[in-house]
Amino acid sequence: MIARLGHMLSNWAKRFVPDPLVLAIFLTLLIALFALPKVDYSLSALSQIWLSGSGTKGFWGLLSFAMQMCLILITGHALAETPLLSRLINKLALLPKTTASAAALVSLVAMLFAFLNWGLGLIVGALLAKSVGQNALKQKRPLHYPLIVAAGYAGLLVWHGGFSGSAPLKVTSAKDLTDVLETDLAQRIEPMLLEQTIGSSLNIVVTLLCLIGVPLLFLFMAPKDEQTMENAPDELLAEASTENNTIATQTFAEKLNHSPLVIAVPVLLSAIWLWGWLQSAGLSRLNPNVMNLAMLAAGMALHGSVHAYSAAVQRAVKSCAGIILQYPFYAGIMGIMAGSGLVLDVSAGLATLGPKALSVATFYLAGLVNLFVPSGGGQWAVQGPIIMEAALQSGAKPETILMALAYGDQWTNMIQPFWALPLLGICRIKAGGLLGYTALILMISQLFFVLPLIVFA
């Protein structure tokens, strides 16, 4: 049944789900149609608020935010490829001997690393799944590889409640609030420290439910009949046997490129600054810039040279294409909504629901919007003003509503293959191979989010 579901979802996605940029343009058109009556059907006025919003927001209003999100992905990706983590991944891959134990282990490790940094969790999950598949091929042991790869994607189910969560990190200061929200709205919301969001009782309960429940689900999904298992592709064995022969450095320039002393300069400066910041501001005011600096310094230190780190970044940077191209369109959508007054209209409707119903509605709406805006940061930019205004009007706690958005965004990642592309490439598998399993995770895991939201709202 699960295999049939995966095949059905894969075929449906290939036929009906276009490129995310197409979805962003479609969403722009949809919002523009709703906004036209608000601007007296003036296309000139509509184009003006699309480009500049109300005030400084509009099409180009999220450039710095987009760069922050790119760096979260790039620095996490580069850190996952360090020799230290590679050795850890290879050792972990030797532990499980069955499909069930391997799926449970891979999902748990992917989620733990994704809680620290979503880019790191995505790549660690992929590399661990690949290594498990390689070991099974070497030992000629049956293994249902698609389930293992699906488990490697499980980190995207918890990331937005972790230390690289776009929404929680962009509300820890008044400046960060103003970067995304309109100035008037930002001034009516107090900055939310991490103990109110990532470190809250709500998030601790939700994260623990995921860390316990998801590996158990993967454990139970493992097929028992060896005849139904699908082994990893044989090409993974060829990759495992390929040796990386480093050319001896001879020129002065090459020696500098490979010298640990050169890269020690930014690492040392970053470490000194981070220690001072931690002493003065505290972890509760963590923001994307601080997180990126920490991940950058750790990656540089563990790679040990400019050459090695630059090579890792070059491999990672192609994954940022979607962020670079789509964020201006998300900003333009928010410009239309804010400039036309649609934000206030939609917020007023949501505010009538009351705190508990608003938190649940925000969760499911965020899950739906994630299918059109496959980016946590982009989603915060599009939905943030609406839900924050609704929270203020309904008397709900803004931090709870913010986390409801974060949970909805990460929840439907299980059927949103946009961020799975790096994993699919590393593991040499097509999306249809894992969609059936992740869809089942989606259906059951909503309980891990909705029930705590009702209790803590």
Image (spheres, helix red, strand yellow):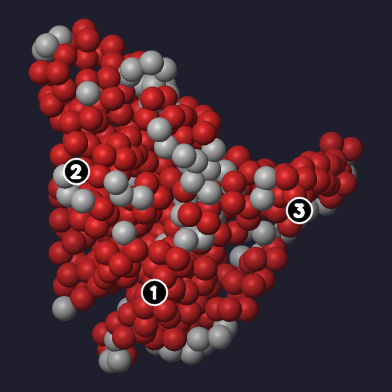
Q: In this figure, which residue is indicated by the disc labeled 2?
A: 350
Instruction: Give yes or no for contact between labels 1 and 3 (Cβ–Cβ under 8 Å).
Output: no
Earlier sequence position, callout 2 versus callout 3: 3
- The percent position of residue 130, horizontal first and vertical second, equals 49, 70
Residue at 39%, 74% in the rendered image: 209
Mark 2 in CB contact with mark 1 (< 8 angstroms): no
Q: Which circle marks residue 150 in the picture?
A: none
Q: Residue at x 22, y 69 (%)?
A: 443
Frontmost residue, 20 versus 178: 178
User: Looking at the picture, does residue 348 appear above or below residue 42?
Assistant: below
Q: Is residue 149 left or right of residue 396?
A: right
Instruction: State the image quarter where residue 55 is shown.
Output: top left
Q: Secondary structure at mark 2?
A: helix
- Eyeballing the image, is 393 above or below 165? above
Near-viewer residue (170 or 263)? 170
Which element is circle 1 on?
Answer: helix
Query: Residue 47 occupies which quadrant of the picture?
Result: top left
- Amino acid type indicated by mark 1: Leu
Q: Which residue carries the number 3 mark?
A: 301
Q: Where is residue 412? Give x, y as percent.
A: 28, 57
Quote the CA–CA distance across marks 1 and 3: 34 Å
Residue drawn at 43 percent across, 45 percent down: 167
Residue at position x 37%, y 41% in the image: 380
Residue hosting label 1: 209
Mark 2 to mark 1: distance in Å?
28 Å
